[in-house]
Image (cartoon, helix red, strand yellow):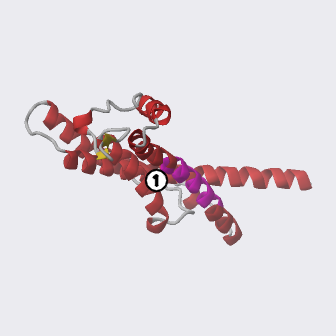
Amino acid sequence: MPETSSQSEYRSIEFLSDLRSRSRLFLAGMTGIAAVWAILILAAPVAAASALESLSGPLYDFFGYVCHQLPDRSFHLLEHKLAVCSRCSGVYFGLLGGLLAYPFVRPLDNSDPLPRFWLFASMVPIAADWSLGYFGVIENSHFSRVITGLILGVGCAIFIAPALIELAEISLRRSALKSRKATS
């Protein structure tokens, strides 16, 4: 197994503290994007129920590019379908939940990703649920769709977060290099 930057070189306590701060910032930015995405998913039916077609229409149209939005495969809020189906809802809310939980599970100065096996393992349940439903072996349900979506969403989050930490580390190193060049 090749050495990663966190294993092969010394990093001072000050650098690690700055890295954790910058990692929190990067992770907060991605979590904010995921939160806005999730809020927009919920905003579409709320706007539709409030007769705000000028808001709900564009939201449903926008999310129509990433989801089939079939009413019988979607959760409903205020008697209107969410902007995405139950499976996509699981993926997006799982991604948000995974990003929120990540700092409590792994340190924010560790950019080492988990083995890719776990990313592929998180895809297996959703692929199995879809395949079994598609080929008529079982009739999948909202519950199976949302649970398998949640698993994939969390699985994606635990691979996105280390990448964000690595970006934070690269950004921090570039800032330090620029400041050293400016003072010399």
Q: How many numbered badges does the structure rendering display?
A: 1
Q: Nearer the viewer, residue 18 or 53?
A: 53
Q: Could you say which quadrant of the image residue 132 lies in?
A: top left
Q: Residue at x 24, y 38 (%)?
A: 73
Is residue 170 in view from this perspective? yes
Q: Residue at x 50, y 53 (%)?
A: 161
- Residue 44's spot in the image, x, y percent? 42, 40
Q: Is residue 64 magenta?
A: no
Q: Could you say which quadrant of the image residue 97 lies in?
A: bottom left
Can you name the residue that lies furthest to the left here? 137
Q: Is residue 184 left or right of residue 82?
A: right
Q: Residue at x 64, y 66 (%)?
A: 16
Is residue 11 in view from this perspective? no
Q: Main secondary structure of the magenta part?
A: helix
Q: Which residue is mark 1?
A: 113
Q: Secondary structure at mark 1?
A: loop
